[in-house]
Image: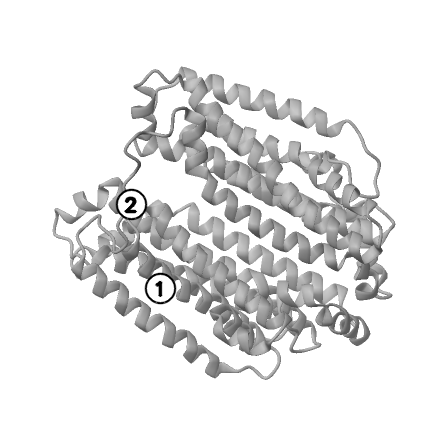
Amino acid sequence: MSGLRELIRLALKRDRVFLPAWLGFLAFAVVITGSSYKSLYDTPRSRAEVVHGLGDTPATLALYGRIYADSVGGLVAWRLLGISVALAGLMSILIVVRHTRAEEESGRAELVGAGVVDRRAPLTAALLVAAGANVALGAIVAVALAALGIGVAGSIAIGIAFAAAGAMFAAVAAVAVQLAVFARSATAIAGAVLAGAYLVRAIGDAGPHWLSWLSPLGWMQQLRPFASERWWVLALALALIVPLLATAFTILQRRDLGAGVIAPTPGPAHGELATPLQLAWRLQRGPLAGWALGFAIVGLALGSIASDIGNVIGDSESVRKALTDLGGSKDLSDAYLATSITVFGLIASLYAVQAILRLRAEETAGHAEMLLATATPRRRWVLSHVAIAAGGTIVLLLAAGLPAGVAHAAQESDASQIGRVLAAALVQVPAAWVLGGIALLLFGVAPRAGAAGWGAVALCVLIGEIGPVADVGDWLLDISPFTHVPRLPGGPMSAAPLTLAVIAAAVAGAGLFGFRRRDVG
């Protein structure tokens, strides 16, 4: 397969930041989960309380799945295989789409194909890079958990589950890029399959359990690490991967370069996008709807177990102290809600950064240059995407806070809880705006360093999740804007959100000023 080695080297060079960032983030999540669960649930009684508390709650079953062992390893497997393996699938989807359909859409694949390059080489290279990333992730996870003393066989099973989940959705993405004409459509198709797999698994774990066997993510839980591992379940993953790859390569050999099985629908006879804001909304409404749906589902699940968090924790003073330190309230339900909503704020900042960096994607694709060649000024084009990012952040936190408040109010039989939880969600907005403003500053001043906006979010995640528990210095905690957000519900209100909003506006203004003074492209 001519050109394969060179394409693999090119992909690895292009992903020299992307891959280490993903692998580092997932590995960090695994290590933190393993170490915290080992210290927090070090007695059979504390673990039994989790199994009989969260293990019987429908919302928790839907969110994380079923607990198959009451050991520390069993709880770690339950916590990781519910959500984290889905992130491995998302990583694989992004890798495959990035190096296949996105290259065709930009025209680079045609230039590469004009050389001595086999037609199958780009897809094969993308799949091999994704496979290598998944193998590396699986090895890191297995070694990390085994080093924590949780258990070798179960740690290997969890590592294999991560790698297998990533491989399955790399195969799904390989088919999606043959179906769609545009990279974002291929990502949406593969992402919808991933979301559907999670939803089927959630319904199966919370209700009729046989449904979870219809989900590839459910198979990874059925591997049952630390509970007499079922290694034969991996044959199901292989049975899915092989036909998907065969289908992808068959379609690839028969379609034209740049074409897809699903032809794009023609646009309206008369243009409907009269303003840059309408165009920005058209480009970003799909991702925003997906984010909002995810926020609403998770918010409903987390809010429904807030009243029972004390029963889940039991008499573990260390867990209670850690939760009250993070939540800023002596009331466990309020501390739990405050901690959970802070996580929503951090995730909403990811959306804000993504929406802002769409400006850079439009610029590198050449779309911005064509738009700015008209009477549209630079400032108006940038502000249209800023408006979507800022408004979308509010929508996401409303989508999380309202269901969480309704669920908590229903448990407490107290309608006032809706307003309390909703207020706790909305005070996170200015902090997320600050990180979006940093992304805009990077776009305007140093566009090639725009990816550092994701690094800023990752730094805030580390500070927020570890800082209060690890007792680091105040100067480090103060770096994160989320440190200054009032810990609601339960904590006192302050003027910090207003101050953060002013800071976000100032940083964003500096980014806009920088973009107006630099060359496009």
Residue sitting at 31 percent across and 50 percent down?
Answer: 99
Q: Name the kind of residue labelled 1 in the image.
A: Ala
Q: Quadrant of the C terminus?
A: top left
| Direction from residue 42 to residue 124 in the image, left or right | left
Q: CA distance from mark 2 to mark 1?
A: 26 Å
Q: Does the CB distance between marks 2 and 1 fall below 8 Å?
A: no
| Residue 265, numbered circle | 2
Q: Tell me: residue 103, above or below residue 169.
A: above
**Outermost residue to the front:** 269
- Does the image show residue 469? no
- Does the image show residue 428? yes
- Most foreground residue, 400 or 51: 400
Dot 2, how many residues are within 10 Å of its Cα: few (below 14), some (14-19), or many (20+)?
A: few
Q: Name the kind of residue labelled 2 in the image.
A: Thr
Dot 1, how many residues are within 10 Å of its Cα: few (below 14), some (14-19), or many (20+)?
A: many
Q: Tell me: residue 359, above or below residue 122.
A: above
Q: Which residue is mark 1?
A: 171
- Secondary structure beneath dot 1 equals helix
| Direction from residue 352 to residue 362 in the image, left or right | left
Q: Position of residue 53 (x, y in %)?
A: 77, 69
Residue sitting at 34 percent across and 15 percent down?
Answer: 375
Q: Position of residue 372 (x, y in %)?
A: 34, 21
Task: Tell me the mark number nearer the camera, choosing from 2 and 1.
Answer: 2
Q: Position of residue 519 (x, y in %)?
A: 35, 20
Residue sitting at 50 percent across and 74 percent down?
Answer: 219
- Secondary structure beneath dot 2 equals loop
Residue sitting at 44 percent across and 61 percent down?
Answer: 193
Q: Position of residue 269 (x, y in %)?
A: 27, 33
Q: Tell me: residue 205, above or below residue 430.
A: below
Q: Tell me: residue 361, above or below residue 373.
A: below
Q: Mark 2 or mark 1: name the one nearer the start of the chain.
A: 1
